[in-house]
Image (cartoon, rainbow, N blue to C red):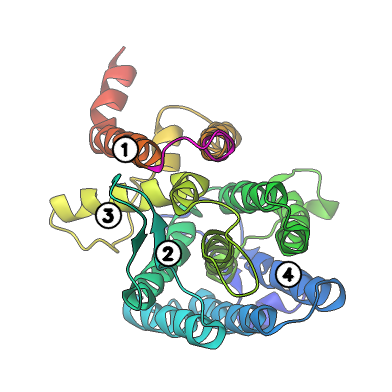
Amino acid sequence: MPLAPQIGLIDYPNDRKNHDGAIPLIGGLSIFTGVLIASTLFVQQSQLLNLYLISSALLVFIGTMDDIYDLSVTPRMIFQGLVAAIMIFGGEIYLSEFGNLFLLGDINIGLYGIIFTILACITAINAFNMIDGIDGLAGSMSIISVLSIAILTFMSNNNDGVLLPLILVTATLPYLFYNVSSRNPRDKKIFMGDAGSMFMGLTVIWLLTLGTQNTESNDAAFRPVTALWIIAIPLMDMFAIMLRRIRKGDSPFKADNGHLHHICLRLGLSSRQALLVISLFAIMFSLIGILGEIFQVAESIMLVVFISLFLAYSYGLQHAWKFIRVMKSD
């Protein structure tokens, strides 16, 4: 924390940020440092682990630069794509197998999966970055997603694959204490920053890729369609808000106050109440995915239900302001 003001890692209130005072943007750096040390000491060393740590370090660096200098969208996305490419070509693992989604047999897109994985990485990174709008939300979404992956991995009897997700969860809990709790020592509040939210997004898509694809060393722990349920809230919120911006004629990357957490606040919920409600929805979606995996519900059914919920979510987000006006008029 003492270093934050000296290097410019401070978040000041503005027209979109209503917090009180100057808050250090060091949560992401702290979480990454904890994961780096713990995984180096306790996780079996491998090329995949080293690639993950190197890629994460590069992304945390660009996220820190973004926190300090407020970079534009283009260089951020280019760098995110480069980080994804390092992971893909270095580890020779990417999303190519999608299961039997349309009742026509297993789908395998082969080398086209490289392009798809780069796009998926950029999507996940920005989904967690965009969801980071109120205290504790990005951290809670990360814990729910990563813990769900750990449960599914454990259920597949891949005990070695459980340790890294548990390390990430353990490293994130102290951050939540300093970000959300009013009882932290001397009220030393911190924010995750872009470095943290992008690191979380990269970690989640990395674990999902490892968990859903068959490799020479490991069999897939769960089906690809289940991954959608694991990151449902960040994914749905990002795509729904981007569609809303495009319909209005704005850039899909233009910041606004139309996210799910903003709507919860407009409905009169406090920041903590909004955090609780959104977290409960995220837990519910993850449970649907886990139960679907346990009972081997057809992948086509899981996909159709997910798409239906996304369409309902998107419609609700588009018309939320009408509902809010009616509520306030009453």
The three-letter amino acid code for the residue at tag 2 is: Asn
* Whether label 3 touches label 1, CB < 8 Å: no
Query: Residue 80: x percent and y percent?
Result: 44, 78
Magenta stretch?
Answer: 290-299
Per the image, the residue denoted by label 3 is 242
Assign a secondary structure to mark 2: helix
Q: Residue at x 81, y 44 (%)?
A: 183
Residue 17, visible in the rendered structure: yes
Per the image, the residue denoted by label 4 is 30
The three-letter amino acid code for the residue at tag 4 is: Ser
User: Which numbered disc flags the more N-terminal residue, 1 or 4?
Assistant: 4
Query: Residue 132: x percent and y percent?
Result: 51, 55
- On-image quarter of the C terminus: top left
* Whether label 2 touches label 1, CB < 8 Å: no
Assign a secondary structure to mark 1: helix
The three-letter amino acid code for the residue at tag 3 is: Met
Residue 1, visible in the rendered structure: no
User: Which numbered disc flags the more N-terminal residue, 2 or 3?
Assistant: 2
Q: Is residue 263 above or below residue 236?
A: above
150 to the left or right of 68:
right
**Is the stretch drawn in magenta largely helix, strand or loop?**
helix
Per the image, the residue denoted by label 2 is 126
Q: CA distance from mark 2 to mark 1?
A: 24 Å
Q: Residue at x 28, y 62 (%)?
A: 254
